[in-house]
Amino acid sequence: MDGIKVHVVPLGGENASGLRLVNLHLPESVHHGVSFPIQIILEGKGDGELRLYRNGGLNHVRKLQKTDTAGEALTISALEKMPGYTDYEAELLSGAEPYNTLQRRGGTVRVEGPLQVLYLVKSDFNTDSQPLFADIIRSQGIPVEVITPDRLDPALRADSMSWSRY
């Protein structure tokens, strides 16, 4: 005996779709009230129907007619209104009856409370006037608190070296 014979039988032949749901990209965390992208990565060619579920309920449906793709990203904008955790699942139904295939990818997004900015200024900063950058952030509807380092909570002061600086 020279080995094991393997016979490959493609299901569906000409009717089968080569459209594949490769991945679902979700941000790890978002702030409620701020839109964020959901990216669905597709490959191959063929027709199909893409469904996006949010916490088990159908949220978005899109018919797909694809030619050859190489890691094409389909982006859908989402917005969460309450803090907590939200589950998303992408489902791709592709191919022709009776050989259609169902593919799924899912993930969870942590939805945090409202976005807030703590803006530190130099100790000798005139607090009667506001920094321009803080005003720009405020114009986007994001609350900003402008303080000097001496007003910073001592527990936070030690950790402030790791904060983002602009």
Image (cartoon, helix red, strand yellow):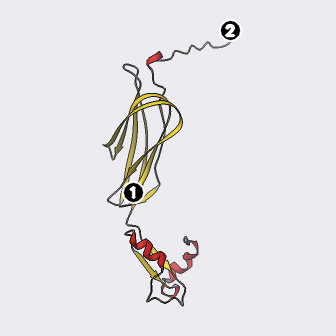
Residue on which the image places disc 2: 1
Whole-number angstrom distance, CA of label 2 to CA of label 1: 62 Å
The amino acid type found where label 2 is placed reads Met
| Residue depicted at 50% across the width and 17% down the height | 10
Tell me the quarter of the picture where residue 80 sits: bottom left
At mark 1, the secondary structure is loop
Q: Quadrant of the C terminus?
A: bottom right
Residue on which the image places disc 1: 35
Q: In the rendered view, would you say 155 is above or below 105?
A: below
Q: In the rendered view, would you say 36 is above or below 90?
A: below
The amino acid type found where label 1 is placed reads Ser
| Residue depicted at 49% across the width and 83% down the height | 152
Left or right of 55? Residue 128 is right
At mark 2, the secondary structure is loop
Q: Quadrant of the N terminus?
A: top right
Please tell me the numbered disc located at residue 18.
none
Tell me the quarter of the picture where residue 136 sits: bottom left
